[in-house]
Image (cartoon, rainbow, N blue to C red):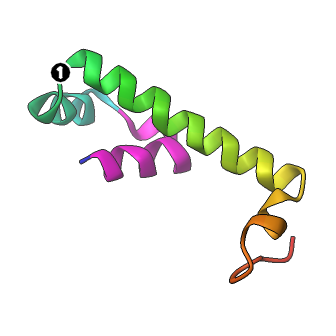
Amino acid sequence: MAVRFAERLAADHRTVDRAFKAELREHFKDAEIAELAFMINQYIALGRLLVIFGGDKLACEIYTPEY
C-alpha cells in the first residue's frame, strides 16, 4: 500500500482521490498517512534535485540516463 501511495505521489498526485484515501485509512491512521506522505515527498524532492544538479550521475555508477 505504501509503495502504491509513493507511486501515485511521484507520477500523478491527483490520483490520490477519496477512494484511495479510504483504502489508505484501512491500513494506516491519519497521522501515519501524513508522516508517510512527508517522507515520500522528501525523497521525491531529493531525487529531483539530484537530477537537476547532476548528482544522479555521480551517485549511480550502474545506470545514468542521458537527458
Q: Out of 62 and 17, give the one closest to the viewer.
A: 62
- Is residue 11 within the magenta segment? yes
Q: Out of 20 and 58, give the one closest to the viewer.
A: 58
Q: Out of 37 and 18, give the one closest to the viewer.
A: 37
Q: Considering only vertical position in the picture, is 34 above or below 53?
A: above
Q: How many marks?
A: 1
Residue for point 80% across, 56% down: 51
Residue for point 21% across, 34% down: 24
The answer to which image quadrant residue 42 occupies is top right
Please state the horizontal and vertical placement of residue 32, each as a whole percent of the image: 27, 24
Q: Is residue 28 left or right of residue 59?
A: left
Residue for point 69% across, 83% down: 62
Please state the horizontal and vertical placement of residue 60, each as a whole percent of the image: 72, 72
Query: Residue furthest toward the left?
Result: 26
If the image is split into quadrants, where does the C terminus sit? bottom right
Q: Dot 1, how many residues are within 10 Å of its Cα: few (below 14), some (14-19), or many (20+)? A: few
Q: Is residue 43 left or right of residue 53?
A: left
Query: Residue furthest toward the bottom?
Result: 62
Q: Which residue is mark 1?
A: 29
- Disc 1, SS: loop
Q: Which residues are magenta?
A: 2-16
Please state the horizontal and vertical placement of residue 50, each as a whole percent of the image: 78, 51
Q: Considering only vertical position in the picture, is 62 above or below 48?
A: below
Q: Amino acid at mark 1?
A: Lys
Residue for point 48% across, 41% down: 9
Q: Considering only vertical position in the picture, is 13 above or below 53?
A: above
- Is residue 19 within the magenta segment? no
Characterize the magenta stretch by its predominant secondary structure. Answer: helix
Q: Out of 38 and 26, give the one closest to the viewer.
A: 38
Query: Residue furthest toward the top?
Result: 31
Please state the horizontal and vertical placement of residue 26, each as a whole percent of the image: 9, 32
